[in-house]
Image (cartoon, grey):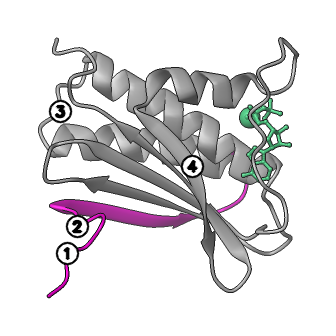
Amino acid sequence: MPPQPHAAVLQFTQLLSATRRGARLARLLTVEQLVQWGWPRDSERVEAAEVVVAELAANAVVHGRLPGRGFRLGLMLLPDSRLRIEVTDPRGDRLPAACPVADEDGRGLVIVDALTDGWGVLPYPPSGKTVWAEVSPARGRA
Ligand SMILES: Nc1ncnc2c1ncn2[C@@H]1O[C@H](COP(=O)(O)OP(=O)(O)O)[C@@H](O)[C@H]1O
Ligand SMILES: [Mg+2]
């Protein structure tokens, strides 16, 4: 079998409504899942993952929403213990634009950038996209 780029040891996926409540649920489910996977509840890495999911889910709901469609949260614990977060929304025609300008807009992705080892966007055929971000377990050991 060829090597899989993101072979997950453990994974979680949940379809959520594209609402403020759905975004909130994404954040809460992330914390509970990480605790279940053994990440300490009050650790910097759980807090980082929580903030990143909150920002990406808010973006899916605000910028990536299509009427009648939800968004999908994916969490993957990778073999090297990094956490891969994936938030998929139906608007492949609109993409995140991380703007380094000190503006009111664009702060969410600046925060995501600061809290992760990296993030990016992949097409989600036929017409959606996945915004992914990876949180290192070395991000705070407490
Ligand atoms: N999931 C998304 N779908 C479409 N556009 C997005 C998405 N996420 C971010 N964007 C675009 O990137 C910009 C920057 O996002 P962000 O840094 O979170 O700032 P904000 O959400 O406050 O505008 C947004 O204003 C939006 O134009
Ligand atoms: Mg945002």
Q: Amino acid at mark 3?
A: Trp
* Ligand 1 under 8 Å from disc 2 Cβ: no
Secondary structure beneath label 1: loop
- Mark 2 = which residue? 7
In this rendered view, identify the residue nearer to me: 2 or 32: 2
Q: Indicate whether residue 11 is drawn in magenta.
A: yes
- Mark 3 = which residue? 39
Q: Residues within 10 Å of mark 4 (few under 14, many from 20)?
A: few
Q: In the picture, which quadrant includes the N terminus? A: bottom left
Whether pointer 1 and pointer 4 mark residues with C-beta atoms closer than 8 Å, the reply is no
CA separation, marks 3 and 2?
Answer: 19 Å
Q: Amino acid at mark 2?
A: Ala
- Mark 1 = which residue? 3
* Sequence-first tag of 2 and 4: 2
Q: Indicate whether residue 54 is drawn in magenta.
A: no
CA separation, marks 2 and 1?
Answer: 8 Å
Secondary structure beneath label 2: loop
Q: Which residues are magenta?
A: 1-20
Residue 111 against residue 21 in the figure, above or below: above
Residue 120: which disc? 4
Percent of width and height locating residue 137: 21, 30
Whether pointer 4 and pointer 3 mark residues with C-beta atoms closer than 8 Å, the reply is no
